[in-house]
Amino acid sequence: MIGARVARNFETAHATITPELRVGWGAQWLDQSQGIESSFIGAPLSGYKASVSGHAYHAAVIDAGVSMRMTNTLSASIRAGLELFRPDHEAQAVSVGIKYAF
């Protein structure tokens, strides 16, 4: 993954608010099928084989969020992200967090 991040702090009377935007380009160059051989612990003769197909791709990743620090010990955040243009794959994510440090 290679990309850029832009963020800026805004001071208010009650909190420090930080909006952030990250964009990136991701790539996977493993385009050959791979074989995996494994077995369970304690049962080495119960092995199995799996084959995974090649997964070469290029994708754009966009992530935006806002964090707010109310005190030295209390902060909150919300983030949303998208992965675009990856063949046969879609990804969206949202996270909300509250952090209390003691």
Image (cartoon, helix red, strand yellow):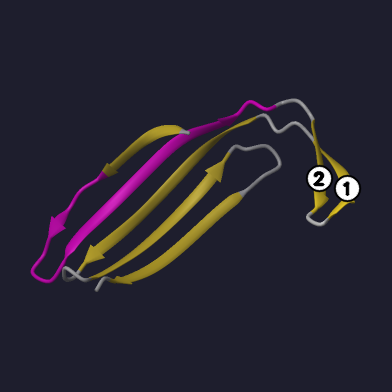
For label 2, the residue is: 38
Location of residue 17 by image quarter: bottom left
55 or 78: nearer the viewer: 55
Mark 2 or mark 1, which is nearer the start of the sequence?
2
**Residue 9: x percent and y percent?**
17, 53
Range drawn in magenta: 7-30
Location of residue 71 by image quarter: bottom left
- Tell me: residue 16, above or below residue 27: below
The residue drawn where x is 55% and y is 54% is: 92
31 or 13: nearer the viewer: 31
**Residue 36: x percent and y percent?**
80, 38
Mark number displayed over residue 68: none
The residue drawn where x is 32% and y is 40% is: 5
Residue 20 drawn in magenta: yes
Label 1 and label 2: CA atoms lie apart by 5 Å
Location of residue 84 by image quarter: top right
For label 1, the residue is: 47
Left/right placement of residue 10 relative to residue 77 reads left
Left/right placement of residue 55 relative to residue 6 reads right
Query: Are the two marked residues, 1 and 2, in contact with CB atoms closer than 8 angstroms?
Result: yes
**Residue 72: x percent and y percent?**
16, 68
At label 1, counting other C-alpha atoms closer than 10 Å, the crowd grade (few under 14, some 14-19, many 20 or more) is few
User: Judging from the image, what secondary structure is the residue with disc 2 in?
Assistant: strand
Q: Amino acid at mark 2?
A: Ser
